Image (tube, rainbow, N blue to C red):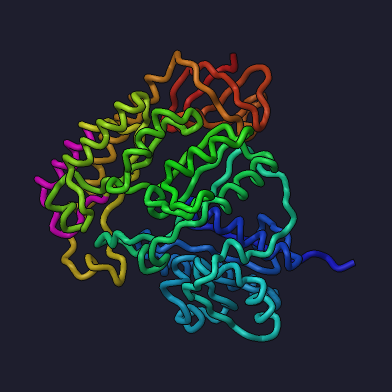
């Protein structure tokens, strides 16, 4: 009996890449591959890459250097580059890295089985097209295994916003929304396989405008309401959003749909109107703050997360102080913050950059403020009871780990805890990045 070939996937970056890696594994599973968590055991290695962070391409080439000894020891090992670096670099990857056998962009990974077959026939295929066909509908289906209690579901891809710092419109393409019926079908399948919480994904997820089951285009709010009707789906989340697409019906959904969790990731990037204009964000700091007021009026316990870039070209100390003022006004439960780094091909890439010392200083000050807010938000949970969707055993005997309604990581002990259960937990302590509690 032929032994199954083994597939190792290393995923970089966002949740959408995690979802894409799962689909790649399913696609190659139909061709006889089973996943392994050890690159040393693999017959095929895929690096599913992200192009958002600084020197993303160089980090991929460094990883390929680390993989070269495996290829030298096993010439039959196949190595592929997928994702946004693959889209941006294309055939250049094959020139710079002879160990690579195939390059596939984020819109064409449904073609992986055919590309893998081409590699076995001696080719080195590159596919970075933006095809008209729906890749999700053309993915070959592998075995439908049981799933953990949480899952991602991509509902929208691409972005039409063209922020001056961002490569997404160039690597993921224009905004495309998947038809609602296909999403509902995939969600029901996930629930049948054990999933109880689904996070809807999109580069601009609240810009969703997919064809609905009634013949009209649906908004994200309409999709959320339809998903909420699936009986054994207990929780719904979505990420990442743009302030300009936070519509009235989506705000209303936060008030009216119990299964929509009270957590929202809503990037603003800067608190300076001058910098926001230079970023091509098309909103002001005041408009963002008024939007937060409306959201909190709809859902008073809403936990907010955001994204910030410090040191965007031309940012002054006054501009940065405006960002700190906005953070103080909002009061975030968590946030992601980064020093500006130029992405090749974006409008901001040609602008003069700030001194590294200024970038480091501003990032440190911003992160100190965000950390203070995060710790205050977590400490406010001590003594309260939360619902935790239990995901996996913890490190300590009898301990289980899961997420609260507000996406806090909770380490819980006590009776009746098991994977996939929604448990009531009384919070007893707050750690830097998690909460601890006892099941009640």
Q: Where is residue 4 in the image (x, y as percent from the top left)?
A: 79, 64
Left or right: residue 205 versus residue 419 is left
Q: Is residue 8 magenta?
A: no
> Predominant secondary structure in magenta?
helix
Left or right: residue 313 versus residue 53 is left
Q: Where is residue 403 in the image (x, y as percent from the top left)?
A: 52, 31
Q: Is residue 326 magenta?
A: yes
Q: Is residue 65 visible?
A: no
**Residue drawn 21% across and 53% down?**
282
Q: Which residue lies furthest to the right in this view?
A: 1
Q: Position of residue 387 (x, y in %)?
A: 53, 23
Q: Is residue 94 visible?
A: yes
Res 355 quadrant in image: bottom left
Q: How many labels does the image show?
A: 0
Res 51 quadrant in image: bottom left
Quarter of the image for the N terminus: give it. bottom right
**Residue drawn 58% across and 40% down?**
150
Observer-nearest of 164 and 413: 164
Quarter of the image for the C terminus: give it. top right
Q: What stretch is highlighted in magenta?
A: 309-328
Observer-nearest of 247 and 295: 247
Res 342 quadrant in image: bottom left
**Residue drawn 58% across and 71% down?**
80
């Amino acid at each position: 009996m032929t032994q199954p070939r083994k597939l190792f996937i290393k995923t970089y970056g966002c949740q959408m890449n995690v979802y894409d890696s799962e689909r790649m594994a399913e696609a190659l599973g139909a061709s006889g591959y089973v996943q392994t968590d050890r690159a040393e055991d693999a017959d095929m290695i895929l690096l599913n890459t992200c192009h958002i962070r600084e020197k993303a391409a160089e980090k991929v080439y460094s990883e390929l250097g680390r993989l070269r000894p495996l290829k030298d020891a096993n010439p039959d090992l196949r190595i592929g580059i997928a994702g946004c670096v693959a889209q941006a670099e294309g055939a250049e990857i094959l020139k710079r890295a002879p160990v690579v056998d195939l390059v596939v962009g984020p819109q064409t990974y449904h073609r992986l089985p055919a590309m893998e077959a081409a590699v076995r026939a001696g080719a080195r295929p590159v596919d970075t097209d933006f095809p008209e066909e729906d890749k999700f509908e053309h993915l070959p289906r592998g075995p439908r295994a049981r799933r953990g209690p949480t899952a991602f579901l991509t509902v929208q891809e691409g972005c039409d916003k063209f922020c001056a710092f961002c490569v997404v419109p160039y690597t993921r393409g224009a905004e495309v929304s998947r038809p609602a019926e296909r999403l509902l079908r995939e969600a029901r399948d996930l629930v049948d396989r054990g999933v109880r919480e689904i996070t809807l994904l999109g580069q601009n997820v609240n810009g969703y405008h997919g064809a609905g089951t009634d013949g009209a285009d649906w908004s994200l709010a309409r999709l959320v309401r339809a998903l909420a009707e699936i009986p054994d789906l207990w929780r719904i989340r979505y990420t990442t959003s743009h302030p300009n697409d936070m519509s009235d019906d989506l705000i209303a959904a936060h008030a009216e749909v119990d299964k929509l969790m009270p957590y929202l990731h809503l990037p603003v990037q800067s608190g300076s109107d001058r910098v926001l204009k230079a970023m091509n964000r098309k909103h002001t700091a005041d408009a963002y703050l008024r939007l937060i007021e409306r959201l909190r009026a709809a859902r008073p316990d809403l936990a907010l997360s955001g994204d910030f870039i410090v040191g965007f070209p031309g940012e002054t100390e006054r501009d940065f102080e405006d960002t700190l003022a906005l953070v103080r006004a909002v009061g975030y439960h968590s946030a992601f913050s980064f020093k500006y780094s130029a992405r090749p091909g974006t409008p901001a890439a040609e602008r003069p950059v700030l001194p590294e010392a200024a970038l480091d200083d501003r990032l440190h000050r911003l992160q100190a403020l965000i950390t203070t807010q995060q710790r205050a938000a977590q400490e406010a949970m001590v003594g309260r009871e939360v619902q935790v969707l239990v995901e996996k055993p913890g490190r300590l005997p009898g301990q289980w780990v899961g997420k609260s309604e507000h996406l806090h990581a909770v380490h819980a002990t006590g009776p009746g805890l098991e994977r996939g259960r929604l448990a009531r937990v009384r919070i007893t302590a707050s750690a830097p990045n998690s909460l601890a509690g006892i099941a009640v």
